[in-house]
Image (cartoon, rainbow, N blue to C red):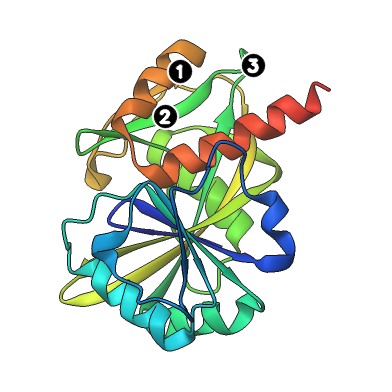
């Protein structure tokens, strides 16, 4: 599970799957919660926490929402059983379901949107009774005027924000998609979308300097999939 709070990734891994932690994320700090206090002020770089209890995790998340001025890059929490940690996190927020896509055209360019001054990928909330896959296709068409078909699931992200003093946890399921036809790109103005563009590799890399960590994570998963399919 990867949770984004204030645009910082909080990754929760089962200890049995710690081999899946990306290479390059060497830990600058390892904290054993049984032996020392867990203080945000101590975090730096990629911080790894072992033996964290549910209550300690909840306190940590509350602290992250206080915008404490901490300057770490990410947190990895290694646990024996991830299920109770996810349940505790869900209980701390109002859960909102969404779906989105990384959409490719015939030139292998990716569909991006500029929304409120930042580059983003098409996504949106599920309607009542709607399935994730149907919502992903609908949102791409509504936000960008692009018809697309699903190829496969990419990943799931969780990110938090506050709305009317209520903390929201948005769970978004992401899909790899292919566009159908060559319709004119039309941004959905009522959703504050300023423009929609098909971006090649160089332009996409530039866009990724002005987007959210959760979107960079989705693109990273997309790039990993592309690399593995070429092997």
Counting residues from the start of the chain, the first of labels 2 and 1 encountered is 2
Most foreground residue, 128 or 53: 53
In whole angstroms, how far apart are the C-alphas of marks 3 and 2? Answer: 15 Å
Tag shown at residue 112: 2
What residue do we see at 59% from left, 60% from top? 132
Q: Report the residue marked by disc 3.
A: 106
Are discs 2 and 1 less than 8 Å apart at CB? yes
Q: Nearer the viewer, mark 3 or mark 2?
A: 2
Element at label 1: strand
Other residues around mark 1 within 10 Å, as few (<14) / some (14–19) / many (≥20)? many
Quick one: quadrant of the C terminus?
top right
In whole angstroms, how far apart are the C-alphas of marks 3 and 1? Answer: 12 Å
Q: Residue furthest front?
A: 35
Counting residues from the start of the chain, the first of labels 3 and 2 encountered is 3
In whole angstroms, how far apart are the C-alphas of marks 2 and 1? Answer: 7 Å
Measuring from the top left, give residue 159's x and y in whole percent. 39, 60
Other residues around mark 2 within 10 Å, as few (<14) / some (14–19) / many (≥20)? many
Element at label 3: loop
What residue do we see at 45% from left, 11% from top? 202
Q: Nearer the viewer, mark 3 or mark 1?
A: 1
Most foreground residue, 110 or 55: 55
Element at label 2: strand
């Amino acid at each position: 599970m990867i949770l984004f709070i204030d645009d910082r990734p909080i990754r929760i891994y089962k200890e049995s799957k710690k081999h899946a932690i990306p290479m390059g994320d060497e830990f600058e700090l390892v904290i054993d919660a049984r032996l020392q206090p867990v203080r945000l002020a101590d975090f730096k770089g990629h911080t790894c926490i072992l033996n964290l209890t549910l209550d300690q995790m909840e306190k940590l998340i509350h602290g992250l929402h206080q915008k404490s001025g901490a300057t770490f890059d990410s947190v990895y929490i290694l646990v024996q059983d991830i299920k109770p940690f996810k349940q505790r996190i869900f209980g701390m927020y109002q859960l909102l379901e969404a779906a989105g896509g990384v959409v490719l055209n015939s030139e292998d360019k990716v569909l991006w949107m500029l929304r409120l001054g930042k580059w983003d990928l098409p996504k949106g909330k599920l309607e009542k009774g709607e399935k994730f896959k149907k919502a992903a296709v609908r949102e791409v068409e509504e936000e960008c005027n692009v018809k697309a078909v699903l190829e496969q699931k990419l990943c799931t992200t969780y990110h938090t924000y506050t709305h009317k003093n209520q903390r929201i946890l948005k769970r978004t399921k992401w899909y790899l998609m292919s566009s159908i036809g060559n319709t004119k790109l039309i941004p959905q103005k009522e959703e504050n979308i300023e423009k929609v563009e098909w971006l090649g590799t160089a332009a996409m890399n530039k866009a990724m300097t002005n987007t959210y960590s959760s979107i960079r994570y989705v693109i990273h998963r997309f790039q990993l999939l592309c690399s593995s399919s070429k092997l």
